[in-house]
Amino acid sequence: MTERGSTQIGRIVGALEVGGTHVAATAVDTGNWQLLAPIQRVSLDPAGSADALTDGMASCARAVLTAAPILQLTSWGVAMPGPFDYATGIARYTGVGKFESLDGVAVGGRLRDGLFGTAGQRDAEGAVRFGNDADAFAIGEYLAGATRGISRTAAITLGSGIGSCFLADGQPVDTGDAVPPGGEAHLIRVDGVPLEEIASRRAILSAYLAATGKQLDVKEIADRARHGQAAAVSVLDDYASTLGGALGPNFARFGVEKLVVGGSIAGAWDLFDPAFRAALPDPELAIAISADAERSGLIGAASLALT
Protein backbone atom coordinates (compact mmCIF):
# COMPACT_ATOMS: atom_id res chain seq x y z
CA MET A 1 0.00 0.00 0.00
CA THR A 2 1.34 3.39 -1.00
CA GLU A 3 1.81 6.06 1.64
CA ARG A 4 -0.83 8.74 1.58
CA GLY A 5 0.45 11.83 -0.19
CA SER A 6 2.86 9.80 -2.30
CA THR A 7 3.32 10.86 -5.91
CA GLN A 8 3.15 7.27 -7.14
CA ILE A 9 0.44 6.91 -9.78
CA GLY A 10 -1.67 3.77 -9.63
CA ARG A 11 -4.51 2.59 -11.75
CA ILE A 12 -7.20 5.27 -12.07
CA VAL A 13 -10.73 3.94 -11.66
CA GLY A 14 -14.24 5.23 -11.23
CA ALA A 15 -16.06 4.89 -7.92
CA LEU A 16 -19.80 4.95 -7.33
CA GLU A 17 -21.47 4.76 -3.92
CA VAL A 18 -25.22 4.21 -3.77
CA GLY A 19 -27.04 5.30 -0.62
CA GLY A 20 -30.68 5.19 0.34
CA THR A 21 -31.54 8.60 -1.12
CA HIS A 22 -28.61 9.59 -3.31
CA VAL A 23 -25.63 8.33 -5.29
CA ALA A 24 -22.11 9.79 -5.24
CA ALA A 25 -19.28 9.29 -7.73
CA THR A 26 -15.67 10.28 -8.32
CA ALA A 27 -12.39 9.01 -9.77
CA VAL A 28 -9.67 7.54 -7.57
CA ASP A 29 -5.93 7.00 -8.04
CA THR A 30 -5.39 3.58 -6.49
CA GLY A 31 -1.67 4.26 -6.09
CA ASN A 32 -2.24 6.71 -3.24
CA TRP A 33 -6.02 6.51 -2.75
CA GLN A 34 -6.55 10.15 -3.61
CA LEU A 35 -9.68 11.49 -5.28
CA LEU A 36 -8.92 12.92 -8.71
CA ALA A 37 -12.26 14.55 -9.49
CA PRO A 38 -14.85 16.56 -7.55
CA ILE A 39 -17.46 14.31 -5.96
CA GLN A 40 -20.66 14.28 -8.00
CA ARG A 41 -24.03 13.64 -6.36
CA VAL A 42 -27.48 12.80 -7.71
CA SER A 43 -30.61 12.38 -5.59
CA LEU A 44 -32.45 9.06 -5.78
CA ASP A 45 -36.05 8.34 -4.89
CA PRO A 46 -35.95 4.93 -3.16
CA ALA A 47 -39.52 4.39 -4.37
CA GLY A 48 -38.69 5.39 -7.95
CA SER A 49 -38.87 3.25 -11.06
CA ALA A 50 -36.03 0.96 -12.10
CA ASP A 51 -35.28 3.21 -15.08
CA ALA A 52 -35.16 6.34 -12.91
CA LEU A 53 -32.85 4.71 -10.38
CA THR A 54 -30.36 3.21 -12.83
CA ASP A 55 -30.44 6.35 -15.00
CA GLY A 56 -29.62 8.41 -11.90
CA MET A 57 -26.67 6.17 -11.06
CA ALA A 58 -25.31 6.28 -14.61
CA SER A 59 -25.77 10.05 -14.94
CA CYS A 60 -23.87 10.60 -11.68
CA ALA A 61 -20.98 8.50 -12.99
CA ARG A 62 -20.97 10.32 -16.35
CA ALA A 63 -20.84 13.65 -14.50
CA VAL A 64 -17.38 12.64 -13.25
CA LEU A 65 -16.18 12.41 -16.85
CA THR A 66 -17.68 15.83 -17.57
CA ALA A 67 -15.97 17.34 -14.53
CA ALA A 68 -12.62 15.71 -15.38
CA PRO A 69 -12.68 15.02 -19.13
CA ILE A 70 -8.99 14.09 -19.22
CA LEU A 71 -9.72 10.87 -17.33
CA GLN A 72 -10.29 7.60 -19.16
CA LEU A 73 -12.31 5.43 -16.83
CA THR A 74 -12.91 1.93 -18.14
CA SER A 75 -13.24 0.26 -14.74
CA TRP A 76 -15.76 1.18 -12.06
CA GLY A 77 -16.29 -0.08 -8.53
CA VAL A 78 -19.81 0.28 -7.18
CA ALA A 79 -20.76 0.10 -3.49
CA MET A 80 -24.40 -0.96 -3.07
CA PRO A 81 -26.57 -1.68 -0.03
CA GLY A 82 -27.89 -5.21 0.28
CA PRO A 83 -29.65 -7.41 -0.46
CA PHE A 84 -27.78 -7.54 -3.77
CA ASP A 85 -26.07 -10.28 -5.79
CA TYR A 86 -22.67 -8.63 -5.99
CA ALA A 87 -21.14 -11.28 -8.26
CA THR A 88 -23.80 -10.95 -10.98
CA GLY A 89 -24.82 -7.33 -10.48
CA ILE A 90 -28.47 -8.24 -9.97
CA ALA A 91 -30.53 -6.48 -7.31
CA ARG A 92 -32.51 -8.53 -4.78
CA TYR A 93 -34.51 -5.82 -3.06
CA THR A 94 -37.77 -7.22 -1.78
CA GLY A 95 -39.49 -6.50 1.49
CA VAL A 96 -36.86 -3.95 2.53
CA GLY A 97 -38.77 -0.73 1.87
CA LYS A 98 -36.38 0.72 -0.71
CA PHE A 99 -35.32 0.19 -4.32
CA GLU A 100 -37.96 -2.51 -4.70
CA SER A 101 -38.46 -1.65 -8.39
CA LEU A 102 -34.90 -2.93 -8.92
CA ASP A 103 -35.64 -6.42 -7.60
CA GLY A 104 -34.38 -8.88 -10.22
CA VAL A 105 -32.93 -6.08 -12.38
CA ALA A 106 -29.44 -6.49 -13.86
CA VAL A 107 -28.09 -3.22 -12.51
CA GLY A 108 -24.59 -4.09 -13.73
CA GLY A 109 -25.73 -4.43 -17.33
CA ARG A 110 -27.65 -1.17 -17.19
CA LEU A 111 -24.68 0.69 -15.76
CA ARG A 112 -22.37 -0.73 -18.42
CA ASP A 113 -24.82 0.42 -21.08
CA GLY A 114 -25.07 3.86 -19.49
CA LEU A 115 -21.32 4.27 -19.16
CA PHE A 116 -19.89 2.52 -22.18
CA GLY A 117 -22.73 2.30 -24.72
CA THR A 118 -25.21 -0.49 -25.32
CA ALA A 119 -24.03 -3.95 -26.31
CA GLY A 120 -22.98 -3.99 -29.95
CA GLN A 121 -22.01 -0.33 -29.83
CA ARG A 122 -19.11 -0.57 -27.39
CA ASP A 123 -15.56 -0.16 -28.62
CA ALA A 124 -14.41 -2.09 -25.55
CA GLU A 125 -16.19 -3.86 -22.74
CA GLY A 126 -15.97 -1.71 -19.64
CA ALA A 127 -15.84 -3.35 -16.25
CA VAL A 128 -18.35 -2.63 -13.48
CA ARG A 129 -17.83 -4.53 -10.22
CA PHE A 130 -20.00 -4.43 -7.13
CA GLY A 131 -19.51 -4.75 -3.39
CA ASN A 132 -21.38 -4.12 -0.16
CA ASP A 133 -21.57 -0.49 0.98
CA ALA A 134 -20.59 -1.20 4.61
CA ASP A 135 -17.61 -3.23 3.38
CA ALA A 136 -16.59 -0.36 1.11
CA PHE A 137 -16.72 2.11 4.00
CA ALA A 138 -14.57 -0.16 6.18
CA ILE A 139 -12.04 -0.77 3.40
CA GLY A 140 -11.82 2.95 2.65
CA GLU A 141 -11.07 3.68 6.30
CA TYR A 142 -8.42 0.93 6.28
CA LEU A 143 -6.76 2.25 3.11
CA ALA A 144 -6.84 5.97 3.88
CA GLY A 145 -8.72 6.70 7.08
CA ALA A 146 -9.01 6.15 10.81
CA THR A 147 -8.07 2.46 10.78
CA ARG A 148 -5.34 2.74 8.19
CA GLY A 149 -3.04 -0.27 8.19
CA ILE A 150 -4.43 -1.78 11.42
CA SER A 151 -4.67 -5.56 11.23
CA ARG A 152 -7.97 -6.30 12.97
CA THR A 153 -10.65 -3.66 12.61
CA ALA A 154 -14.40 -3.27 12.53
CA ALA A 155 -16.68 -0.62 11.10
CA ILE A 156 -20.31 0.17 11.80
CA THR A 157 -22.61 2.56 9.99
CA LEU A 158 -25.54 3.96 11.93
CA GLY A 159 -28.48 5.36 10.02
CA SER A 160 -31.89 4.01 9.10
CA GLY A 161 -30.38 0.61 9.93
CA ILE A 162 -27.06 -0.82 11.09
CA GLY A 163 -24.26 -1.74 8.70
CA SER A 164 -21.13 -3.55 9.77
CA CYS A 165 -17.89 -5.02 8.49
CA PHE A 166 -15.03 -6.90 10.14
CA LEU A 167 -11.64 -6.66 8.41
CA ALA A 168 -8.56 -8.85 8.77
CA ASP A 169 -5.62 -7.09 7.08
CA GLY A 170 -8.05 -5.14 4.93
CA GLN A 171 -10.13 -8.15 3.83
CA PRO A 172 -13.78 -8.52 4.92
CA VAL A 173 -14.51 -11.57 7.08
CA ASP A 174 -18.09 -12.80 6.92
CA THR A 175 -17.87 -16.36 8.18
CA GLY A 176 -16.98 -17.99 11.48
CA ASP A 177 -18.07 -17.61 15.09
CA ALA A 178 -16.09 -14.41 15.62
CA VAL A 179 -18.41 -12.28 13.45
CA PRO A 180 -22.19 -11.88 13.22
CA PRO A 181 -24.00 -14.01 10.61
CA GLY A 182 -22.59 -12.98 7.24
CA GLY A 183 -20.57 -10.34 9.07
CA GLU A 184 -23.76 -8.24 9.21
CA ALA A 185 -24.89 -6.68 12.48
CA HIS A 186 -28.50 -6.40 11.38
CA LEU A 187 -28.72 -10.22 11.42
CA ILE A 188 -27.95 -10.36 15.15
CA ARG A 189 -30.94 -11.24 17.30
CA VAL A 190 -31.33 -9.99 20.87
CA ASP A 191 -33.73 -12.09 22.95
CA GLY A 192 -35.13 -13.42 19.69
CA VAL A 193 -35.69 -9.95 18.20
CA PRO A 194 -33.70 -8.61 15.21
CA LEU A 195 -31.20 -6.00 16.42
CA GLU A 196 -32.55 -3.35 14.04
CA GLU A 197 -35.97 -3.60 15.71
CA ILE A 198 -34.51 -2.33 19.00
CA ALA A 199 -31.37 -0.42 17.95
CA SER A 200 -32.06 1.68 14.86
CA ARG A 201 -33.31 5.09 13.87
CA ARG A 202 -36.92 3.91 13.88
CA ALA A 203 -36.42 2.34 17.31
CA ILE A 204 -35.08 5.62 18.71
CA LEU A 205 -38.03 7.56 17.29
CA SER A 206 -40.55 5.01 18.55
CA ALA A 207 -39.06 4.93 22.05
CA TYR A 208 -39.01 8.73 22.29
CA LEU A 209 -42.60 8.95 21.07
CA ALA A 210 -43.67 6.40 23.69
CA ALA A 211 -41.83 8.30 26.44
CA THR A 212 -42.94 11.83 25.57
CA GLY A 213 -45.81 11.66 23.10
CA LYS A 214 -43.71 13.74 20.70
CA GLN A 215 -42.51 12.65 17.26
CA LEU A 216 -39.04 14.07 16.64
CA ASP A 217 -36.07 13.04 14.49
CA VAL A 218 -32.80 11.76 15.91
CA LYS A 219 -31.02 15.11 15.62
CA GLU A 220 -33.77 16.85 17.61
CA ILE A 221 -33.73 14.11 20.24
CA ALA A 222 -29.93 14.41 20.45
CA ASP A 223 -30.23 18.18 20.91
CA ARG A 224 -32.60 17.64 23.82
CA ALA A 225 -30.27 15.04 25.33
CA ARG A 226 -27.41 17.55 25.21
CA HIS A 227 -29.60 19.96 27.13
CA GLY A 228 -30.25 17.34 29.79
CA GLN A 229 -33.77 16.17 28.95
CA ALA A 230 -34.14 12.92 30.89
CA ALA A 231 -36.34 11.15 28.32
CA ALA A 232 -33.95 11.89 25.47
CA VAL A 233 -30.91 10.81 27.50
CA SER A 234 -32.63 7.57 28.49
CA VAL A 235 -33.69 6.69 24.94
CA LEU A 236 -30.20 7.27 23.51
CA ASP A 237 -28.53 5.42 26.38
CA ASP A 238 -30.79 2.42 25.78
CA TYR A 239 -29.94 2.47 22.06
CA ALA A 240 -26.19 2.66 22.71
CA SER A 241 -26.24 0.02 25.45
CA THR A 242 -28.20 -2.41 23.27
CA LEU A 243 -25.84 -1.83 20.35
CA GLY A 244 -22.73 -2.31 22.47
CA GLY A 245 -24.12 -5.40 24.18
CA ALA A 246 -25.01 -6.99 20.85
CA LEU A 247 -21.72 -6.25 19.07
CA GLY A 248 -19.27 -6.37 21.98
CA PRO A 249 -18.88 -10.17 22.04
CA ASN A 250 -18.02 -10.15 18.31
CA PHE A 251 -15.47 -7.38 18.83
CA ALA A 252 -13.85 -9.45 21.58
CA ARG A 253 -13.84 -12.75 19.67
CA PHE A 254 -12.54 -11.13 16.50
CA GLY A 255 -9.82 -9.26 18.37
CA VAL A 256 -10.85 -5.83 17.08
CA GLU A 257 -8.04 -3.35 17.66
CA LYS A 258 -10.00 -0.31 16.53
CA LEU A 259 -13.60 0.44 15.62
CA VAL A 260 -14.60 3.19 13.19
CA VAL A 261 -18.13 4.60 13.13
CA GLY A 262 -19.93 6.29 10.25
CA GLY A 263 -23.47 7.00 9.09
CA SER A 264 -25.95 9.80 9.66
CA ILE A 265 -26.41 9.03 13.37
CA ALA A 266 -22.66 9.02 14.04
CA GLY A 267 -22.86 12.76 14.66
CA ALA A 268 -24.45 11.96 18.03
CA TRP A 269 -21.68 9.56 19.07
CA ASP A 270 -20.61 11.79 21.96
CA LEU A 271 -23.98 10.93 23.52
CA PHE A 272 -23.74 7.20 22.74
CA ASP A 273 -20.13 6.58 23.73
CA PRO A 274 -20.42 6.13 27.53
CA ALA A 275 -23.32 3.64 27.43
CA PHE A 276 -21.88 1.85 24.41
CA ARG A 277 -18.49 1.36 26.06
CA ALA A 278 -20.06 0.27 29.33
CA ALA A 279 -21.74 -2.62 27.48
CA LEU A 280 -18.50 -3.85 25.86
CA PRO A 281 -16.26 -6.60 27.25
CA ASP A 282 -13.41 -4.11 26.75
CA PRO A 283 -14.59 -0.57 27.58
CA GLU A 284 -11.17 0.75 26.52
CA LEU A 285 -11.62 -0.31 22.87
CA ALA A 286 -10.20 2.34 20.52
CA ILE A 287 -13.12 4.01 18.72
CA ALA A 288 -12.91 6.67 16.00
CA ILE A 289 -15.61 8.62 14.19
CA SER A 290 -15.00 8.75 10.47
CA ALA A 291 -13.70 12.13 9.35
CA ASP A 292 -15.38 11.72 5.95
CA ALA A 293 -17.54 8.62 5.55
CA GLU A 294 -18.52 9.47 1.98
CA ARG A 295 -14.91 9.74 0.90
CA SER A 296 -14.09 6.45 2.60
CA GLY A 297 -17.02 4.74 0.91
CA LEU A 298 -15.86 5.95 -2.48
CA ILE A 299 -12.28 4.83 -1.88
CA GLY A 300 -13.57 1.43 -0.81
CA ALA A 301 -15.75 1.30 -3.92
CA ALA A 302 -12.73 2.11 -6.08
CA SER A 303 -10.86 -0.84 -4.56
CA LEU A 304 -13.59 -3.13 -5.94
CA ALA A 305 -12.55 -2.22 -9.46
CA LEU A 306 -9.17 -3.87 -8.84
CA THR A 307 -10.65 -7.29 -8.08
Image (cartoon, rainbow, N blue to C red):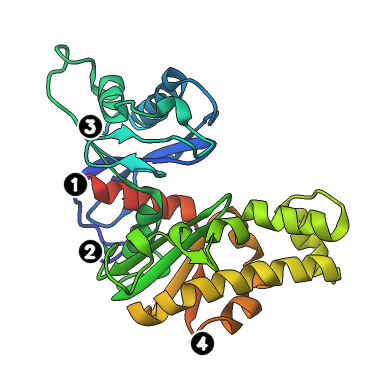
Relative horizontal placement of residue 304, taking residue 103 as reference (left or right): left
Instruction: Establish if 96 lies above or below 155.
Output: above
Mark whose residue sits in front, 4 or 2: 4
Report, in whole angstroms, how far the alpha carbon at label 4 lies from the one at label 2.
30 Å
Residue neighbourhood size for the residue with mark 1, other residues' Cα within 10 Å, grouped as few (<14), some (14–19), many (≥20)? some
Mark seen at residue 284:
4
- Image disc number at residue 152: none
Residue 233 seen in the figure:
yes
Q: Give the mark toward the camera: 1 or 4.
A: 4
Residue 153 picture location, percent across and down: 36, 72
From the image, tell me which residue sits under label 2: 2
Q: Is residue 85 above or below residue 174?
A: above
Query: Mark 4 is on which residue type?
Result: Glu
Q: Residue at x 35, y 56 (%)?
A: 135
Q: Amino acid at mark 1?
A: Arg
Q: Earlier in the sequence, mark 3 or mark 1?
A: 1
Secondary structure under tag 1 reads: loop
Depth check: give the residue in front, 42 or 277: 277
